[in-house]
Image: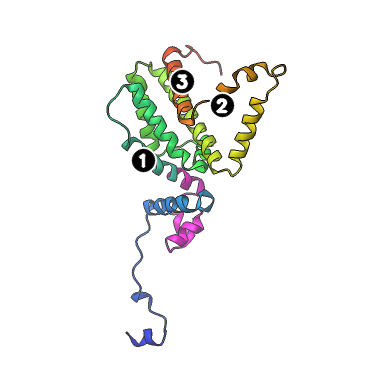
Amino acid sequence: MSVSEKIGMPRSRRERPAKSALTRQGIIDAALTILRDEGLNKVTMRRIAAALDTGAASLYVYVRDTEDLHAQILDALLGSVAASLPVGGTWSARLAAALTRYMRTLFDYPDIARLTLFNWPTGPNYLAFVDLLLALLVEGGVPDRDAAWGVDLLLQFATATATEQGARKASSRAAEELSALATAITRADVATYPQIARLGGELLSGSGATRFVWGLDVLIAGILGTRRPPTVQE
């Protein structure tokens, strides 16, 4: 032990281990760790800077602002979607698998899913995912013009489902609200709400996963069978 260590003297900066170089990927990795452990509201420039042992101002060299950071987080999360998809099967089965994987990825991070509803992702992983969906639709015989609009519908459905279901999972009141809804449906007055009274059991039937796949089938069938108008009235 050195003399300075024995008497508690401060160590020279030159004696301290060198910090790793700051990189954009390092910032995103730190943000993902905070997101998984603490939630999106804790993913701030100051919190990331503390995790990386640097100043918050230094992060802006690599990330424009918090919105840009969130977009980069989303794109990083989507990097695992295409890598986990099955290779074989019909084009429609692969399309459903891709969108299901996308939905489940966002489902785990409802705050990110909510942001995706209002922002336009432009990262390389997102663009690669959109390109994959377009290729599958074209493989299935969907005309190019219809595929271009159809992919937007499919992504909206998957994103909205992930946002809704993820938020319910995180809510402490979700079970109570679902129970209240089930009670209201089963007790619906036949004279006032004849269709709800008649179809109450069906309204509450099916798992979330089953309903999601059915919804995809409906959308895919509609995209296959519906042509875009020759001109669009703006």
Q: Residues within 10 Å of mark 3 (few under 14, many from 20)?
A: some
Q: Residues within 10 Å of mark 2 (few under 14, many from 20)?
A: few
Q: Amino acid at mark 1?
A: Gly
Q: Amino acid at mark 3?
A: Leu
Residue interval drawn in magenta: 44-72
**In the rendered view of the protein, which quadrant contains the C terminus?**
top right
Residue 84 shown left or right of residue 228 in the figure: left
Residue at which label 3 appears:
219
Residue at which label 2 appears:
204
Which residue sits furthest left?
Answer: 88
Residue 216 shown left or right of residue 20 in the figure: right
Pointer 2 or 3: first along the chain: 2
In magenta stretch: residue 131? no
* Rendered residue at 48%/59% (across/down): 56
Residue at which label 1 appears:
79
Pointer 1 or 3: first along the chain: 1
